[in-house]
Amino acid sequence: MKILMKFFLVFLLVGVFSCRDTKKEEEDTEAALEKIEAVEAEAQEIESKINEEASELEDSLKELDSI
């Protein structure tokens, strides 16, 4: 009988842990991914602006060197 009670207790614990709320975890993960994607997009915009300004500065320096 003790073996049956232990088996039932283990089965109950496994059932409780397997039925936890995974939807909230998924929503949190999605929100974090959206934030990461927004930061990546902003970083790419900044990088392209920096590259543009760098090329403009290089062109200006070439003009000054040719004078």
Image (spheres, helix red, strand yellow):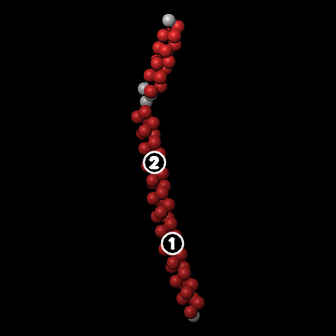
Q: Residues within 10 Å of mark 1 (few under 14, many from 20)?
A: few
Say above or below: 45 vs 27.
below
Residue 13 placed where, x, y %? 49, 20
Q: Name the secondary structure under disc 1.
A: helix
Mark 2 or mark 1: which is in front?
2
Residue type highlighted by circle 1: Asn
State whether residue 58 is above or below residue 12: below
Per the image, the residue denoted by label 1 is 51
Identify residue type, mark 2. Leu
Q: Looking at the image, is mark 2 or mark 1 earlier in the sequence?
A: 2
Q: Do the numbered discs 2 and 1 sit on residues whose CB atoms are within 8 Å?
A: no
Residue at x-position 51% and y-position 72%: 51
Res. 58 image quadrant: bottom right
Q: Along the line of sight, which residue is nearer the eye, 4 or 46?
A: 4
28 relative to 56, above or below: above
Residue labelled with disc 2:
33
